[in-house]
Image (cartoon, rainbow, N blue to C red):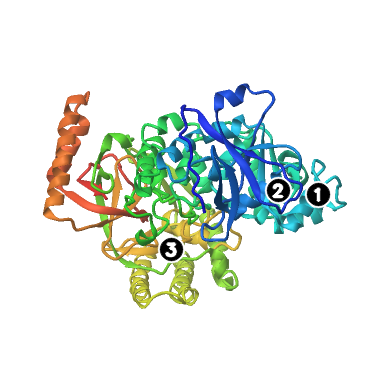
Amino acid sequence: MATFKYHPLQYPDSFRLILLQPSQQRFLPLYCTLECTTISQCDREIIDHYTALSYVWGDPAAKKGLIFIQGAKRVAAVEIGKSLEDALKALRDKKREVRIWADALCIDQSNLVERGSQVELMGQIYSTASHTVIYLGDQAAGQKVLEAIPSNTSGTISPWDINGLKTMAETTLLKMPWFSRVWIFQELLLSKDPRVQCGTVRARWTNLCRVLLSPGYRQRSKELQVLGDMNSAISVHKQKLFVHLTARRGLGATNPRDFIFGHLGIAADVEELKAYVKVDYETSCGKTYNDTARYLLEAVGPETLFHHTSDYSEESRVEDLASWAPDWSMPSAGLATMYRNNTLNTQRLVAKENYFILEHKRYPVLSYLGYEVDHISSLSLTLPEPKFFAETERNVYEQAVTELTTFYHTGSGVWWSGDEEGRHRNFNLRGRETQHQDLCRIIHEEWIKVLGTELPKLSSSSTPEEARLHEKFVENFKTWVTERGKRQIIVAGGDSDGFESLMWLYLMKQQSKDSVLTGRRLAITQSGFSAVVSKFAEEGDRIVFLAGSPVAYIVRPVIVSEDENLELQNALQTLVANQKSTDEDGSKAQNFETALWNSVVNCVLVGECYVEGEVGWTRDKKAQAVYTLN
């Protein structure tokens, strides 16, 4: 098969168009020429417009299609993806030449430099096109849905009732791969006139949405929710990169770098991002994600960024990805925001004044000021969604919760007091101590039953080591509960705090929101406190607070060679010395010098944490160490 030689693109806004030749029969081979043009030229054009194609590439290993391209001297038979062949045959006119842009053919995929420059241009290519055709495939059921849309090209309108049409769309058209790919979002948002096509039946996107997205659609299905979100985004002003990444992480992409590159054309903060990230397919995916993390660390802050780093184990993450950088190729684990105590007064630290980023051979090392509060001693099994406990009857427990809720609001009730440390919740037990202890005992016994008996039954796939750790945790938890029962603490209801509040919410019959405990583990620390930790935490992991974030984090010390450790420390000392000359008050450099003298901990970031009773960065807390997060 002949190899087609692409002519180089001459100008910064140059791109190629497919001039697709007509055919009376859809099944006949494809013939075309490739024309070099520019965005500026097409933008001025009033006669020969072009159509941009939005489609799914498909499996690279699957059956190939074929197109014949007329070159300067001969015709070259070029292999293309079967999905592209099907789309072009469906778009081909019987009598007229059609001008089409399709990325797989219009970009020289073997030229990584050209790929990078064309990716940066793709937003303009879609916004300049007179139309965009979203080709979903040749599915018969999908064609039937589109035939019911008033603007369809079949010449008839199917007499479907609206509910029947929605059901068919939910189970066929909206389940097609196009709706779960990364690039399509940019392609849709930037298109002037998007149209959806199955086979040869085509309808306007706006009309499709008008029919399917009638009031109440969000309660029907996930598929209609996705369609609704995509349609709403068209009319919304540009959102920043982080919003797009969190909303669409883990969707399909042939190249994982495209989770970043595929949003550059629609991100409101793309100009700021360009200082950190370049569209370069010769750069590793790990570096692309690390560079993005460096930007987001400043743009959204550590607390927001680090929430997305602990969703998956280190082994499943992109190669050479720093532990503090999210892996956007993986779908979100759906963890709720970590609980934290907001009742005490804390220092308002600016995160960027408390870290340096060191250049490492493979990834950037985030050197962060912080202090340690405890170590993990024992761990429970991972807690599932509360609904998996739904069939368990808890009549005695629920009655105790009801009585306690009433109990706390009788007499003088619950009230707040304040001092220089912060706010404090109070209630009066005078003369009712025994009654309170009896009710608390019921609550605590239920906790032990849930964690010690019910949870292991739901965790049949746990390893022997996980089972051993859980048994150790349960014994430690019983000791903790015994001591907890002796204290004057609100253990249930809306006035409870900390661990008591988390367990009360987790065991509620009607869940009003996602539980903080779902997808995480419980732990007992070396000091005997309860904690909520990442499912990837291990015995011996350290619990620390990093400056500028009220959330505690789990870090795991790593062993590095003496040479590497010396190299990191020298690099950090150089940065600190340079900082002295730029600091207005010298505080950042001074804080690092003090912490460097105390301790430097080489570690990886494991995830978020809540430790009972611990509030980060209260008035008297100071950084005690530098944590170099690899």
Can you say whether 268 is above or below 216 in the image? above
Choose between 167 and 369: the one closer to the eye. 167
Choose between 407 and 481: the one closer to the eye. 481
Residue type highlighted by circle 3: Glu
Labelled disc at residue 87: none
Report the residue marked by disc 3: 433
Element under disc 3: helix
Can you say whether 462 is above or below 91 in the image? below
Residue type highlighted by circle 1: Glu
Choose between 344 and 324: the one closer to the eye. 324
Report the residue at 14% width, 38% height from top: 573
Q: Is residue 344 visible?
A: no
Report the residue marked by disc 2: 90
| Residue density around tag 3, few if under 14, some if 14–19, many if 20 or more, within 10 Å | few
Q: Say which of marks 1 and 2 sits in front.
A: 2
Report the residue marked by disc 1: 147
Label 1 vs label 3: CA separation? 72 Å
Q: Quadrant of residue 31?
A: top right
Residue type highlighted by circle 2: Ala
Number of callouts in the render? 3
